[in-house]
């Protein structure tokens, strides 16, 4: 005996599959929503501030910097706008150098330097530096030791990193929100199809 095969399954057979598919979509949306909330919280926490626990701790964002090293000294400079933070250590043991006299030149222009803390000094540039490489020269006198240090401050290619770091949390979460919206739309379509299938099945049973 030959059994005919109907390629179109009845709604009563498809309904459990549609319900299972809808539940899976709903579970996936909950997982995506939890990931979105976790990412939002982490970003907001990171943007809340940075604890400069140690004197030589790095800034929260990758600010332009230079490092000049000799046999006796190591001078690190971090630029933020027109403010230049300087950290002077002894090269052999990395201990901070207090009470040093630093004569600083940026592109051949003298910039006054003042002591600010333990091994810390600061200077204010007369005007913002343009993009490009800038010559740094520093004469360090600490007790009986003196040395001339030189370095280059590179201001190329940092704008994109600064813009990304400064972006608000909601803008960083936009891709997650778009994915969640698409998933919720799929759930809505599946729910509508399921409701129609239920009504059609109920109507067929009543007939």
Image (cartoon, rainbow, N blue to C red):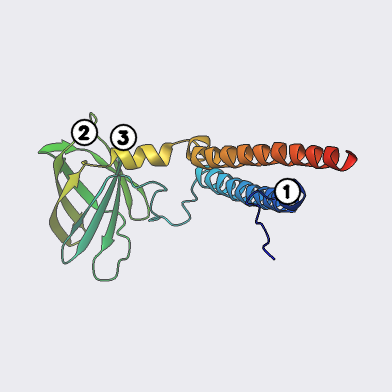
Q: Residue furthest left?
A: 108
Residue 204 on image: x %, y %: 83, 40
Residue at 73% x, 49% y: name it: 19
Quadrant housing the N terminus = bottom right
- Which of 96/190 is in front? 190
- Which of 75/141 is in front? 75
Q: Which mark is residue 91?
A: none
Q: Earlier in the sequence, mark 1 or mark 3?
A: 1
Identify the residue position indicated by label 2 in the image. 129
Vertical placement of residue 175 versus 141, above or below: above
- Which of 40/48 is in front? 40
Counting other residues with Cα less than 10 Å from the Cα at mark 3, is it few (<14), some (14-19), or many (20 or more)? few
Q: Nearer the viewer, mark 1 or mark 3?
A: 1
Q: Which mark is residue 81?
A: 3
Counting other residues with Cα less than 10 Å from the Cα at mark 2, is it few (<14), some (14-19), or many (20 or more)? some
In this rendering, the count of numbered labels is 3
Callout 1 secondary element:
loop
CA distance for labels 2 and 1: 74 Å
Q: Quadrant of residue 75?
A: bottom left
Callout 3 secondary element:
loop
Callout 2 secondary element:
loop
Residue at 13% x, 58% y: name it: 147
CA distance for labels 2 and 3: 8 Å
Residue 118 on image: x %, y %: 37, 55
Quadrant housing the C terminus = top right
Along the horizontal axis of the image, is 110 left or right of 97?
Answer: left
Q: Earlier in the sequence, mark 2 or mark 3?
A: 3
Residue 164 on image: x %, y %: 39, 40
Q: Earlier in the sequence, mark 2 or mark 1?
A: 1
Residue at 29% x, 70% y: name it: 93
Q: Which mark is residue 10?
A: 1
CA distance for labels 1 and 3: 71 Å
């Amino acid at each position: 005996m030959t059994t005919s095969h109907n390629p179109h399954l009845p709604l009563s057979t498809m309904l459990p599959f549609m319900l299972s598919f809808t539940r899976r979509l709903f579970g996936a949306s909950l997982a995506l929503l939890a990931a979105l909330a976790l990412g939002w919280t982490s970003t907001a926490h990171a943007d809340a501030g940075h604890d400069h626990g140690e004197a030589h701790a790095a800034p929260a964002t990758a600010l332009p910097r230079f490092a000049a090293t000799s046999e006796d000294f190591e001078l690190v400079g971090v630029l933020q706008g027109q403010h230049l933070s300087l950290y002077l250590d002894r090269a052999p043991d990395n201990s901070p150098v207090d009470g040093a006299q630093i004569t600083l030149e940026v592109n051949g222009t003298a910039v006054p330097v003042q002591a600010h803390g333990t091994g810390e000094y600061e200077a204010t540039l007369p005007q913002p530096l343009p993009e490009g490489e800038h010559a740094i020269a520093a004469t360090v006198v600490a007790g009986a030791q003196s040395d001339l240090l030189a370095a280059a401050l590179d201001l190329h290619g940092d704008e994109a990193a600064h813009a990304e770091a400064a972006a608000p949390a909601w803008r960083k979460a936009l891709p997650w929100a778009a994915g969640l919206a698409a998933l919720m739309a799929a759930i809505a379509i599946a729910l509508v199809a399921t409701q129609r299938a239920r009504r059609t099945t109920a109507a067929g049973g009543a007939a």
